[in-house]
């Protein structure tokens, strides 16, 4: 004992993977007094939520994101993690209160409002819970066609990245419950309602991972970029504890010998893609809101469009569950999204770049069997795919590392 406090044994931690789960695990170990080495295979931290360098049609080089992301006021663990490294929320996040108007794009008749109210009332009376077997479509039985098209389908795609006919009703209700019923998140500059949408004002690597790298380095720990850990055996003699924070398939590869059953379960996960189409509108064009819902169908792939701050007139269109388009069809998505955007917004659009992340998220279906958090002696596994209450999200990734 020193100064009445128990001395902790300072251990050497290796964290493999510098996505948001790895960053959360690294900060947790650092704050518990350990020495951390964060290994990241890429040259940039952030994983699926990282920045990328892109050249605009003007020739200017800008830092954009691997995919457009939003956070919610209900992401309490993520916001706490950001607070712990001293992030000023006002400087990096734009708060957009969630209103139905964000989703609803056409004028509604009263019976659609009544249909939506009945649906939500029914879910609320059942405590936002349902059986594991119910899909979002089954859960929404009785809803009008417009309610399905304008609210439930886009909400389900943006939250679960999975279509309503197979998406897990249970996870969908949990997301809604947290977004509408959990406490406000109070911070130095004010408070976020749990349903607030928080749109990053800076690129995703700057938003958190770079701050984590700074915290690690300033406190004597280290970050090793561009270093892929090829096997646990290659580092285990140098460390007392290893946290595997890679995407699922890589975790299964690293752990197959020591946890074959766990790896076999990971192999069964299915995935869904997301495409982000960056496009340049004339510099004097502004969206009326930071994000706008679009009507999506077989010809019009994008569900949302966002204003980007990196250049005047720069837009990001998002195609969730792009699996029908993604297989070798990047150009096709881009062509259709640009046509959709031009028709909807009434401006000429130039393509900038289209990023299709084929394994953006796991498929959050009623059939999914997510692997449990694996904790062996001297080793644990974290990541958005580990069994938990949320779909594949930043909050799910961070939660897996801090609980
Ligand atoms: C286009 C897109 C849009 C999305 N939109 C949203 C959104 O709006 N809101 C939201 O909450 N979520 C969103 N998500 C999901 C979110 O990005 C993920 O859930 C989250 O980033 C997963 O974090 P992770 O740390 O678990 O895994 P990852 O981000 O995959 O991180 C794993 C890291 O491990 C590294 N790695 C792999 N193998 C090795 C190795 N052998 N050695 C060292 N390093 C290794 C990888 O390079 C990577 O950096 C979106 C995802 C995508 C792709």
Image (cartoon, rainbow, N blue to C red):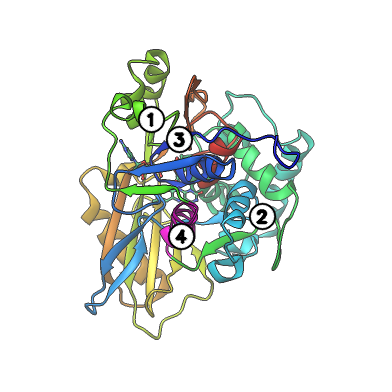
> Magenta segment, which residues?
203-219
Indicate yes or no whether the magenta region holds residue 372.
no
Give percent across and percent down for residue 145. Answer: 56, 47
Give percent across and percent down for residue 286. Answer: 45, 79
Place residue 354 in its image quadrant.
bottom left
Residue under pointer 1: 270
Residue under pointer 3: 12
Give percent across and percent down for residue 262. Answer: 42, 18
Q: Are marks 1 and 2 in contact (CB under 8 Å)?
A: no
Mark sitting on residue 304: 4
Alpha carbon distance from label 1 to label 4 = 24 Å
Give percent across and percent down for residue 82. Answer: 57, 55
Q: Is residue 202 left or right of residue 233?
A: right
Identify the mark nearer the N-term, 1 or 4.
1
Q: Secondary structure at mark 4?
A: strand
Q: Quadrant of the C terminus?
A: top right
Pair 1/3: label in front: 3
Identify the mark nearer the N-term, 2 or 3.
3
Pair 1/4: label in front: 1
């Amino acid at each position: 004992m020193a100064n009445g406090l128990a001395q902790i044994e300072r251990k050497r931690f290796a964290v493999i993977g510098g996505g948001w789960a790895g960053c959360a695990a690294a900060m947790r170990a650092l704050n518990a007094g350990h020495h951390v080495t964060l290994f990241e295979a890429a040259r940039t931290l952030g994983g699926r939520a990282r920045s990328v360098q892109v050249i605009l049609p003007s020739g200017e080089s800008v830092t954009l994101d691997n995919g457009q992301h939003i956070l919610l006021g209900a992401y309490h663990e993520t916001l706490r993690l950001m607070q712990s490294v001293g992030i000023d929320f006002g400087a990096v996040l734009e708060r957009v209160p969630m209103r139905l108007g964000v989703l609803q794009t056409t004028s509604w008749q009263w019976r659609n409002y009544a249909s939506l109210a009945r649906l939500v009332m029914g879910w609320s009376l059942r405590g936002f819970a349902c059986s594991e077997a119910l899909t979002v479509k089954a859960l929404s039985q009785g809803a009008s066609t417009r309610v399905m098209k304008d609210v439930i389908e886009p909400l389900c795609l943006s939250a679960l990245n999975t279509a309503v006919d197979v998406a897990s009703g249970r996870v969908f209700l949990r997301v809604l419950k947290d977004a509408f019923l959990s406490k406000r998140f109070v911070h130095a500059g004010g408070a976020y309602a749990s349903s607030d949408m928080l749109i990053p004002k800076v690129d995703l690597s700057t938003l958190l991972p770079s701050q984590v790298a700074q915290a690690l380095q300033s406190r004597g720990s280290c970050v090793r970029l561009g270093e892929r850990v090829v096997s646990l055996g290659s580092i285990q003699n140098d460390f007392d504890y290893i946290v595997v924070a890679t995407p699922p398939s890589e975790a299964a590869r690293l752990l197959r010998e020591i946890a074959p059953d766990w790896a076999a379960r990971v192999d069964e996960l299915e995935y869904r893609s997301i495409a982000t189409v960056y496009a340049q509108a004339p510099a004097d064009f502004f969206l009326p809101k930071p994000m706008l819902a679009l009507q999506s169908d077989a010809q019009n792939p994008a569900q949302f469009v966002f204003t980007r701050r990196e250049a005047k007139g720069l837009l990001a269109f998002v195609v969730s569950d792009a699996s029908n388009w993604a297989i070798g069809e990047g150009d096709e998505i881009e062509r259709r999204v640009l046509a959709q955007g031009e028709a909807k917004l009434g401006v000429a659009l130039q393509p900038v770049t289209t990023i299709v992340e084929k394994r953006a998220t796991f498929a959050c279906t009623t059939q999914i069997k997510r692997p449990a958090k694996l904790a062996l002696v001297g080793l644990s596994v974290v990541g958005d795919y580990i069994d938990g209450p949320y779909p594949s999200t930043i909050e799910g990734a961070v939660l897996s590392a801090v609980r």
